[in-house]
Amino acid sequence: MNIQKKAFGGKKYFSLPLLIPLILLSIVGLITLYSTLIKSTGGLEDIDILNKQLIFVFIGFILFFAFSYFEISYLKHWQLSLAIYFLTVALLVATLLFGPLIKGVKRWLVVGGFQLQPSELAKFTVIILTAVIFSLKKKYSEWLLLAVSFLLLIPLVSLIYLQPSGSMMLLTIGIWFVLIFMGLNEPLRNGVIVSIILFTVGAFLLPAITGNNLWYLLFIPSVVFAIFGFNAKRDWKIFILISLVIGILFGALSTVTWEHVLKDYQKVRIVAFINPEETSSDYVFNVTQSKIAIGSGKLLGKGFGNGTQSKRNFLPEFRTDFIFASYAEEFGLVGSLFLMFLYGSIIVYCFVTALDCKEDTMSSMICIGVGIKILFEVFINIGTNTGSIPATGIPLPLMSAGGTITIVTFMCLGLVHNISLRNSQKLRTKKADIIDIYED
């Protein structure tokens, strides 16, 4: 991951293992979007959406390089971190107050013809803020930092839910949770705690969703993990007891949430995933058409511009939520594997960079957070397209048409690029010092 090239008069560097897949993904995304504009009868539809996406990608690359050479240590100043946080909160509040009602939801702010989606910015803010908070582990208790981080998370996810956007709220919480898990000490203990909580919550929630009481048997592995943790180490006992209490409380809360908080369309998506044969065909139509489009692509696809599901309006949201189905229909399994390789390269780059700078908590957690963000977005979007998970409205980064997610993705990867370059420079300096000492 240390393949670097000089640029800007030899004073700056860029990393090909990140830059190449980033450029290729951007090109593939634009080509796919252009393909969806080709009419089945010939000619093009209105290319305004393509022109906008070109502008977003151009701005994204500018911000990518700007963030690559930004002095990242400035993020440790609480004034800057809190400014980013309060700006995000303000934008989310403004969305609820002044955002236009589009398809029954308020998720965007319209600024000069551009639709800004503050919930996308919230994911970036959570990554930065959590990393900055946990960089103080040597000064303060990690549990105090966890509490502070959680309290700052609540306003963000609450405002996102009120839009309403349950899937984006859960994604933001998921990113935060993984970051916290990686930031805390004692990974084995943390794994046991998470297992206890998940199995206990599942034992409450799944019977409520499915009506099948056999799911209560999930209490058994929860108890097994609790017994193991209770006897593993003396100082684990209090954490195991707390995790059991949290699991029971969250389990009861999740049942109440399912019965009284979730909206009908959110329940239908989950039930349609678990029991599609018992759900009205209207609710499973989108995913069914997506699976047909992907399957019809076969090995090599139908070819550029030859997709039929999107061009005949069978495939819904084929430029945003179901862009992967549009791509897979025309480029087939081979093209899909190539796309997965590009995403995998970027995600692995983030994680390897995190390992390379593991002594710097903030930098390492930023890289982990960005990698997890992209991994979750790719997994959820493609999982939705293939019917592997309940349908959600999470776009595919660098592929789906959309300005905010495109720009935020470039910003996030710019920070990872920044950290990688600085870490590589430190390694080169260290090697040079060793050589000098040896020669002396």
Image (tube, helix red, strand yellow):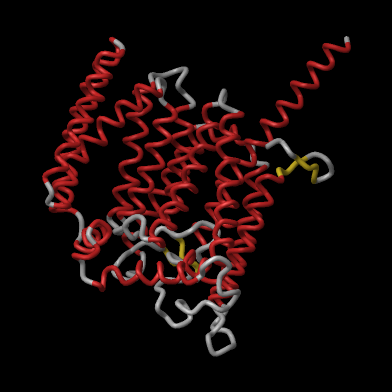
Left or right of 364? Residue 424 is right
**Foreground: 434 or 164?**
434
**Foreground: 233 or 146?**
233
Q: Is residue 7 above or below residue 167?
A: above
Q: Quadrant of the N terminus?
A: top right
Left or right of 219? Residue 389 is right
- Residue 381, located in which quarter of the rendered image? bottom left
Left or right of 122? Residue 200 is left
> Given the current orientation, which residue lies at the most extreme front position?
299
Residue name at image x 54 percent, y 82 percent: 46
Residue name at image x 60 percent, y 41 percent: 349
Residue 410 % position (x, y)? 58, 52
**Foreground: 21 or 111?**
21
**Foreground: 377 or 129?**
377
Residue name at image x 48 percent, y 70 percent: 319
- Residue 214, located in which quarter of the rendered image? top left
Q: Is residue 304 above or below residue 106?
A: below
Residue 70 % position (x, y)? 64, 41
Q: Is residue 360 above or below residue 153?
A: above
Residue 177 % position (x, y)? 37, 37
Left or right of 242? Residue 144 is right
Q: Quadrant of the C terminus?
A: top right
Q: How many marks?
A: 0
Residue name at image x 22 percent, y 65 percent: 277
> Given the current orientation, which residue lies at the most extreme right position?
439
Residue 109 % position (x, y)? 42, 63
